[in-house]
């Protein structure tokens, strides 16, 4: 399988049968987060979408209003024999500012910082990782990253998948 494929729900279960695991993070814009995670050795597939809200099958436009409760998220299928969940968390902390509040006028709620855990082991690791970041002194303000159980992931339209690879600096889709 090619590193960093985008996937649909039909193949996700098949991928997970191979012993791969799922991680889901919200770290601001999902386009940037996906582009960074796709470069990690051991990441098998990525998909961008929405998680953590109350509206079923939300559109990008709906989520952009901040009224659905969803966060823009990147879902990652990874091989834990090649890259650990801990390493993915380290990258998560590096690629965004986890102290930015999700308040109107600053950061809209769809761009908030969230670790969505898929099992109890991920939950424990996420809590330890957040505590480590808080006690490290690296951040001057309080870390406001949420740690929540993963809920239904709504994949964004294909146009949003691997967006940075599709769009040149001029905004035209590269074929």
Image: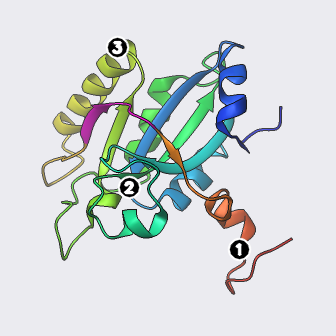
Q: Residue at x 24, y 47 (%)?
A: 138
Local packing at callout 3 (Cα closer than 10 Å; few below 14, some 14-19, many 20+) is few
**Of callouts 2 and 3, the N-terminal one:** 2
Instruction: State the SS at label 2.
Output: loop
Report the Cα–Cα distance between label 2 and label 3: 24 Å
- On the image, numbered disc 2 is attached to which residue? 96
**Of callouts 1 and 3, the N-terminal one:** 3
Q: Position of residue 128 (x, y in %)?
A: 26, 23
Rendered position, 15 above or below 24:
above
Report the Cα–Cα distance between label 2 and label 1: 22 Å
Q: Is residue 105 visible?
A: yes
Q: Is residue 41 visible?
A: no
Local packing at callout 1 (Cα closer than 10 Å; few below 14, some 14-19, many 20+) is some
**Residue reaching furthest front?**
56
In which quadrant will I find the N terminus? top right
Region of the chain picked out in magenta, as a range: 146-152
- On the image, numbered disc 3 is attached to which residue? 120
Q: Position of residue 72 (x, y in %)?
A: 42, 54
Dividing the picture into quadrants, the one containing residue 103 is bottom left
Rendered position, 172 above or below 63:
below
Rendered position, 128 above or below 45:
above
Asked if the residues shown at circle 2 and circle 1 are in contact, with their CB atoms under 8 angstroms apart, the answer is no
Q: Position of residue 161 (x, y in %)?
A: 65, 56
Dividing the picture into quadrants, the one containing residue 170 is bottom right
Q: Residue at x 72, y 30 (%)?
A: 11
Q: Residue at x 34, y 60 (%)?
A: 111
Of the two numbered discs 2 and 1 in the rendering, the one whose residue sits closer to the viewer? 1
Q: Residue at x 49, y 57 (%)?
A: 30
- On the image, numbered disc 1 is attached to which residue? 167
């Amino acid at each position: 399988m090619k590193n960093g494929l985008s996937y649909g729900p039909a193949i996700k279960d098949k991928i997970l049968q191979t012993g791969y695991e799922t991680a889901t993070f919200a770290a601001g814009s999902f386009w940037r987060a996906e582009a960074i995670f796709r470069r990690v050795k051991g990441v098998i597939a990525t998909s961008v979408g929405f998680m953590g809200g109350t509206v079923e099958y939300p559109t990008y436009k709906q989520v952009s209003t901040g009224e659905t409760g969803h966060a823009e998220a990147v879902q990652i299928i990874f091989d834990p024999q090649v890259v650990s969940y801990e390493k993915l968390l380290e990258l998560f902390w590096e690629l965004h500012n986890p102290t930015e509040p999700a308040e109107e006028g600053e950061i809209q709620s769809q761009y908030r910082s969230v670790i969505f855990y898929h099992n109890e082991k991920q939950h424990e690791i996420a809590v330890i990782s957040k505590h480590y970041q808080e006690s490290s002194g690296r951040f001057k303000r309080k870390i406001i990253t949420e740690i929540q159980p993963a809920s239904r992931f709504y994949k964004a339209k294909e146009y949003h998948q691997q967006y940075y690879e599709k769009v040149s600096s001029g905004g035209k889709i590269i074929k």
